[in-house]
C-alpha cells in the first residue's frame, strides 16, 4: 500500500509539471523508441531477405566457372552425371547462360535492362521459377533449341498489358514465342526477378557466340548443401586442377553470412541507441536530485511522523522507476508508430516484437531504479531536524 | 513517563561551542500539561526535538517510559516517534501536494494500518477538528487556522500518548491561537501528555505546569499559577521579542 501511494504520488507530481516531466523522460523516450525501431526494422529486413532467399531456392548451390586459359573445360554432360549419380545429394542441375547486352523488343517498345538467361527445363524447379500461366520450358524446347521463352510479370505488364501468353517478342532481333508467365517474385519491379526472360540455354550460347557455360545451378537435397558443395568442388578440381578456376557457393552459406552480418549491425545500432537510455537514466537521476532538495522539508515531515530510512528510500526509488516507466511506455508507443511508419516508407513489414517491447520496458524501469538509487539514498540519509528546518 | 537526566546539546560554532541545552533535568508524568517557556534562543525547540526523538542529546540520558532513547539508532527512533508522539509545529508542516486526508493518514501509513482503517481514523480526527468537509482540500486551499487544525488532527490520528506543540499559535492571530489551545487542553483532559512550547507567558498560564529555560538551563519549574505571579520578576527586560 505504501508502494501504491508512492506510485500514485509519483504520477501526480509528473502530471503537475508536464513540461519538466517530458524533459526528464526525454532521454528514456528517445532511447526506448530508437531501440524498438531498430529491432523491428532489422527483423523486418531480415525476414524480407530470408524470404527472398527462400524464393530463390533455399537449397540452391551456385557454381561459377571462370575457367583457365587452356582449352580444358567441363562439359555440361559431366555436370548432369554428377547430379544423376549422387541422387542422395542432388535433386537437379541446370546451366544458366546469361545473354550479355540483350535487347528485348515487342511492338515498338525496347527494353535493354531485361535479364535474358538460357536455362534448361530443370531450372524452374531449382530456382522456384514456376509458370503461373502457360508452362515452363520443356525438354524438347531445350533439345530442339526452339524459339520459345517464359517471361516475368513485369515484362508481361509493360510490354503486353498483362496478356502475353502466345505472343512473341524479339531478343536481339530473333522472334521468341511466349509459352509461360512466371509467378510474381519481387513486386513486378524493373530491378528484380520479374524483369527477366528465360530461353533454352543452347539458344543463349548461340547468341553469345560461345561454347562456354559459366554458371550452373544445382539444387541440393535438404540438409545436404555442404556435402553437395564439396562434391562439386572435387569434380571441378579433377578437370581444372586449380581451385581458383571455379567458385561454388551454397544459399545456406550466403544466408548465414548475411544473417550474421545483419545481426552484428543490429546489435551495434541497438547498443548506440541504448546509450541514449543511459543518458536518459542520468537525466532522471539529475531531476531526482533536484526533487530531493526541493522536497527536503517533506522528507523531514515524513520522518517526524515515523517514516524509516527505507520508507523514504522506497518512495524515491519508486518515483524514479515510475518516471522512467512512464517514459518507457511513451517511448514504446513512439517506437511502434515509428517502426510502422518507417517500415511502410521502405516497404518493409516492420512489426515491433513483443520481446522488443518487453525488454525496453524492463530496461527503462531498471534504469529508473538504478539511477533513482543515489537520490533516494540522499533523501533517506537526511537528518529529520535538518530536513524540517530546511526552507 | 518522560525523564531527561542532565541533558546537554552542544553545537560547535567555529572555535567555540553553543550550549543549546546545558544540563537539563526534567521529569514529566503521564497526563501532565507542561508549558516550556523562555526567550528566543533559550533552547526550547532543542529541548522539544530531543523529547520528540527528532534529535539525540550530546550528553546525558533521556528515558521515555523507562527506556533510554538517547542512544537509539535512527529506525528505532522513527518507530518511537510514530507510536508515542504527535507533533504540532509553528509552520503547520503539512505536505503541500497531498490533500488534508492524506496528510493526516501519514503517521498511520508508516504505522502499517490498512487503507480502510487509515481513512476511518484520519476522518474521525479531522471531523473532531471541524474539518470533516475539507478532506480533499490541499493545505494551500485552507486558512492558517484550518491548516493548524489539520496538523493537530495528524498529531492525534494515531492516538499517541504524548502531544508536542512547538509555538503552535506563533503564526496565528490571537483568537485562532486560543482556539488551538482549547484543542490542546481538551487533549490533556482526555489523558494525553501535552508539552507546549511558547514564549508567551499568558499562553503558558493555560498549562498545568511551567518550565522556564534560560540559556539552556531550567530556571523555573513549578505550577502555572505560581509562575504567572513570578513572571514579572523573571522577565528582566520588557516584552518578549518576536520568535521564530
Ligand atoms: N543546528 C544548529 N546549529 C547550531 N546552533 C544551533 C542549532 N540549532 C540551534 N542552535 C542554537 O541553539 C540555541 C537554542 O536554539 P533553539 O532551541 O532553537 O531556541 P528556541 O527554540 O528557544 O528559540 C540557539 O542559540 C541556536 O542558535
Ligand atoms: Mg524555537
Image (cartoon, coloured by chain):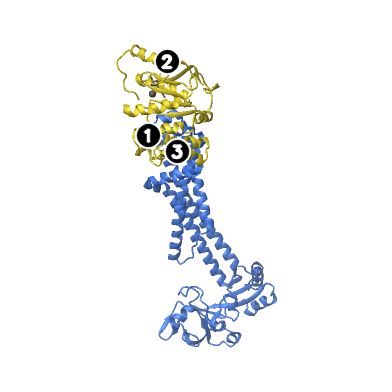
Chain colours: A blue, B yellow
Pick whichever, A374 or B77, lies toward us.
B77
Judged by depth in the image, the label closer to the viewer, 2 or 1, is 2
Alpha-carbon span between mark 2 and mark 1: 31 Å
Q: Tell which circle, 1 or 3, labels the residue nearer the N-terminal end.
A: 3
Label 2: few (<14), some (14–19) or many (≥20) C-alpha neighbours in 10 Å: some
Res. B123 mark: 3
The local secondary structure at tag 1 comes to: helix
The local secondary structure at tag 3 comes to: helix
Res. B147 mark: 1
Pick whichever, B239 or A129, lies toward us.
B239
Circles 2 and 3 in contact, beta carbons < 8 Å:
no
Residue under numbered circle 2: B223
Would you place residue B11 above or below residue B147 in this image? above
Would you place residue A156 above or below residue B134 in this image? below
Task: Establish whether ligand 2 lies closer than 8 Å to the Cβ of label 1.
Answer: no
Alpha-carbon span between mark 2 and mark 3: 36 Å
The chain under label 3 reads: B
Amino acid at each position: 500500500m505504501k508502494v501504491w501511494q508512492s506510485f500514485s504520488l509519483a504520477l501526480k507530481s509528473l502530471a503537475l509539471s508536464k513540461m519538466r516531466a517530458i524533459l526528464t523522460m526525454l532521454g528514456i523516450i528517445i532511447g526506448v523508441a530508437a531501440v524498438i525501431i531498430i529491432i523491428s526494422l532489422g527483423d523486418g529486413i531480415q525476414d524480407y531477405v530470408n524470404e527472398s532467399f527462400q524464393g530463390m531456392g533455399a537449397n540452391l548451390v551456385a557454381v561459377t566457372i571462370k575457367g583457365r586459359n587452356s582449352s580444358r573445360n567441363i562439359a555440361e554432360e559431366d555436370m548432369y552425371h554428377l547430379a544423376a549419380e549422387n541422387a542422395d545429394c542432388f535433386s537437379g542441375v541446370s546451366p544458366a547462360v546469361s545473354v550479355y547486352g540483350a535487347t528485348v523488343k515487342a511492338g515498338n517498345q525496347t527494353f535493354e535492362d531485361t535479364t535474358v538467361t538460357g536455362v534448361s527445363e530443370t531450372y524452374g524447379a531449382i530456382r522456384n521459377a514456376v509458370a503461373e500461366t502457360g508452362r515452363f520450358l520443356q525438354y524438347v524446347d531445350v533439345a530442339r533449341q526452339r524459339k520459345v521463352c517464359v517471361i516475368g510479370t513485369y515484362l508481361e505488364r509493360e510490354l503486353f498489358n498483362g496478356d502475353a501468353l502466345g505472343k512473341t517478342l524479339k531478343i536481339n532481333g530473333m522472334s521468341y514465342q511466349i509459352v509461360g508467365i512466371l509467378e510474381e517474385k519481387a513486386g513486378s519491379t524493373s530491378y528484380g526477378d520479374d524483369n527477366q526472360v528465360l530461353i533454352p540455354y543452347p539458344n543463349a550460347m548461340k547468341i553469345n557466340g560461345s561454347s562456354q557455360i559459366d554458371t550452373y545451378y544445382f539444387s541440393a537435397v535438404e540438409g545436404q548443401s555442404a556435402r553437395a558443395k564439396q562434391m562439386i568442388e572435387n569434380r571441378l578440381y579433377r578437370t581444372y586442377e586449380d581451385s581458383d578456376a571455379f567458385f561454388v557457393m551454397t544459399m545456406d552459406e550466403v544466408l548465414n553470412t548475411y544473417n550474421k552480418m545483419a545481426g552484428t549491425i543490429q546489435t551495434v545500432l541497438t547498443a548506440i541507441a541504448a546509450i541514449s537510455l543511459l543518458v536518459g537514466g542520468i537525466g532522471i537521476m539529475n531531476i531526482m536530485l533536484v526533487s530531493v532538495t526541493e522536497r527536503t522539508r517533506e522528507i523531514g515531515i515524513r520522518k517526524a511522523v515515523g517514516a524509516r530510512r527505507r520508507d523514504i528510500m522506497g518512495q524515491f526509488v519508486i518515483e524514479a522507476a515510475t518516471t522512467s516507466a512512464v517514459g518507457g511506455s511513451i517511448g514504446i508507443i513512439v517506437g511502434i508508430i515509428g517502426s510502422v511508419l518507417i517500415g511502410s516508407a521502405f516497404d518493409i513489414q516492420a512489426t515491433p516484437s513483443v520481446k522488443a517491447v518487453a525488454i525496453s520496458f524492463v530496461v527503462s524501469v531498471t534504469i529508473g531504479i538504478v539511477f533513482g538509487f543515489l537520490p533516494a539514498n540522499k533523501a533517506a540519509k537526511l537528518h529529520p531536524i535538518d530536513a524540517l528546518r530546511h526552507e | 513517563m518522560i525523564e531527561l537526566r542532565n541533558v546537554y546539546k552542544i553545537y560547535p560554532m567555529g572555535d567555540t561551542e553553543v550550549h543549546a541545552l546545558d544540563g537539563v533535568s526534567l521529569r514529566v508524568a503521564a497526563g501532565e500539561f507542561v508549558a516550556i517557556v523562555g526567550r528566543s534562543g533559550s533552547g526550547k525547540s532543542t529541548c522539544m526535538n530531543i523529547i520528540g526523538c527528532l534529535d539525540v542529546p550530546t550528553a546525558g540520558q533521556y528515558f521515555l517510559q523507562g527506556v533510554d532513547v538517547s542512544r537509539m539508532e535512527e529506525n528505532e527512533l522513527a518507530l518511537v516517534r510514530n507510536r508515542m508522539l504527535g507533533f504540532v509545529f509553528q509552520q503547520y508542516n503539512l505536505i503541500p501536494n497531498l490533500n488534508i486526508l492524506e496528510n493526516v493518514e501519514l503517521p498511520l501509513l508508516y504505522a502499517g494500518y490498512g487503507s480502510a482503517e487509515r481513512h476511518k481514523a484520519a476522518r474521525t480526527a479531522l471531523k473532531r477538528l471541524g474539518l470533516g468537509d475539507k478532506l480533499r482540500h490541499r493545505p494551500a486551499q485552507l486558512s492558517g487556522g484550518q491548516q493548524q487544525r489539520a496538523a493537530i488532527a495528524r498529531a492525534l490520528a494515531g492516538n499517541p500518548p504524548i502531544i508536542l506543540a512547538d509555538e503552535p499559535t506563533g503564526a496565528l492571530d490571537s483568537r485562532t491561537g486560543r482556539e488551538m489551545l482549547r484543542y490542546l487542553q481538551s487533549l490533556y483532559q482526555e489523558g494525553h501528555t501535552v508539552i507546549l512550547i511558547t514564549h508567551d507567558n499568558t499562553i503558558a498560564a493555560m498549562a498545568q505546569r511551567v518550565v522556564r529555560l534560560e540559556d539552556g538551563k531550567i530556571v523555573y519549574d513549578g505550577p502555572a499559577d505560581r509562575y504567572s505571579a513570578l513572571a514579572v520578576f523573571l522577565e528582566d527586560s520588557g516584552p518578549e521579542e518576536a520568535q521564530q
